[in-house]
Amino acid sequence: MSESPVMRPDLDLERFRSLLEDERDRLLLVERDLLESSRQSKDSLEGFSDSDDVPADIAAQASEREKEQLMGRSVQQALTAIAYALERFDDGTFGICEMCGCDIPELRLERIPWAATCVDCQNMLEEG
Ligand SMILES: [Zn+2]
């Protein structure tokens, strides 16, 4: 009666949850800084997907202004993905690919704790 079914008993869920919470807290600080330094209109979340890309690579090539815009959008995307991932702990579906229902490999979750799909499905999404 107390706990919801966990679909990935093989994972150290508490560790992943705290990874996500730490990352969320870090991103909230980044977001606050960005909002303070540039009050530009928000980019929409169009084309949002559970991106594998950490903003660093892209950002390194962009000008300062572009970098801020990219960062702001990436941060919001990441925060959305993290919030979603945290919800999935509550219904026990964390670590389950939401497209095909397979187990997302732990290695992928180590790299991207907020991943909501397996690599195959992610590739399909990106290729359209
Ligand atoms: Zn899948």
Image (tube, rainbow, N blue to C red):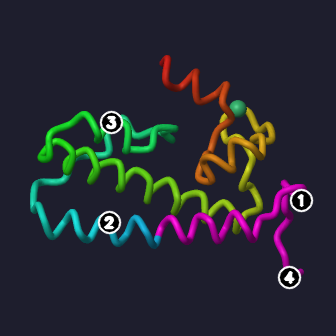
Where residue 114 appears, x then y in whole percent? 59, 52
Find numbered disc 1 in the image and state the secondary structure of the residue it sits on.
loop
Q: Give whichever of discs 1 and 3 has the lower sequence position.
A: 1
Q: Residue furthest front?
A: 60
**Mark 4, residue position:** 2
Q: Are marks 3 and 2 in contact (CB under 8 Å)?
A: no
In the image, taking residue 41 as reference, residue 125 lies left or right, namely right
Front disc: 2 or 1 = 2
Find numbered disc 4 in the image and state the secondary structure of the residue it sits on.
loop
Numbered disc total: 4
Q: Are marks 2 and 4 in contact (CB under 8 Å)?
A: no
As drawn, 28 above or below 123: below
**Mark 1, residue position:** 9
Front disc: 1 or 3 = 3
- Seen from the viewer's position, the closer of residues 89 and 16 is 16
Q: Which mark is residue 58?
A: 3
Where residue 86 appears, x then y in whole percent? 61, 65
**Mark 2, residue position:** 30
In the image, taking residue 66 as reference, residue 120 lies left or right, namely right
Front disc: 2 or 4 = 2
As drawn, 82 above or below 29: above
Q: Assess whether residue 121 is covered by the magenta stretch.
A: no
Q: Give whichever of discs 3 and 2 has the lower sequence position.
A: 2
Q: Residue at x 23, y 69 (%)?
A: 33
The part of the image, by quadrant, that contains residue 5 is bottom right
Q: Where does the magenta region start and end?
A: 1-24
The part of the image, by quadrant, that contains residue 119 is top right
Q: Residue at x 45, y 73 (%)?
A: 25
Q: Residues within 10 Å of mark 4 (few under 14, many from 20)?
A: few
Question: Spatial distance from mark 4 to mark 3, Cα to Cα?
Answer: 44 Å
- Identified by mark 1, the residue type is Pro
Front disc: 4 or 3 = 3
